[in-house]
Image (spheres, grey):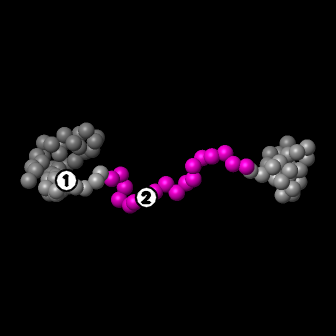
Amino acid sequence: MSKVTKEEVRHVAHLARLQMDEKEIEKYEKHLADILTYVDRLNELNTENVKPTTHVLDLQNVLRSDQEEQSFTQETALENAPAHKEGKIVVPSVMKK
């Protein structure tokens, strides 16, 4: 079991710029000791045949590769535009003069 001292709690609180009274120091002394005990228990697990993972779910990239493909022609895009002028789509003005 890992032991955390009150002095270590004071040091961590100082580094985190936290002000703690004696009651809080005792409280966090126990909390930190419990956390370290749990970590010690995790270290007892046999993970020899467990593959390292970066995510708990088996995710795969579903995006296609980035390849150049034929797209709309300018004429096709202009056919679907509500208004066009000189080969460009006309949109309502968003800025006032």
Numbered disc 1: secondary structure: loop
Number of callouts: 2
Identity of the residue drawn at 91% across and 43% down: 86
Quarter assignment of residue 37: bottom left
Identity of the residue drawn at 39% across and 60% down: 58
Identity of the residue drawn at 33% across and 53% down: 53
Q: Which residue is mark 2?
A: 59
Of residue 68 and residue 28, the one placed in the foreground of this image is: 68
CA separation in Å, label 1 and label 2: 23 Å
Span highlighted in magenta in the image? 53-70
Q: Label 2 neighbourhood size at 10 Å, few (<14), some (14-19), many (20+)?
A: few
Identify the main secondary structure in magenta.
loop
Position in image of residue 69 (x %, y %)? 69, 48
Q: Label 1 neighbourhood size at 10 Å, few (<14), some (14-19), many (20+)?
A: few
Q: Which residue is mark 1?
A: 48
Report whether 84 appears left or right of 16: right
Residue 94 seen: yes
Position in image of residue 20 (x %, y %)? 22, 47
Locate the C terminus by quadrant.
top right
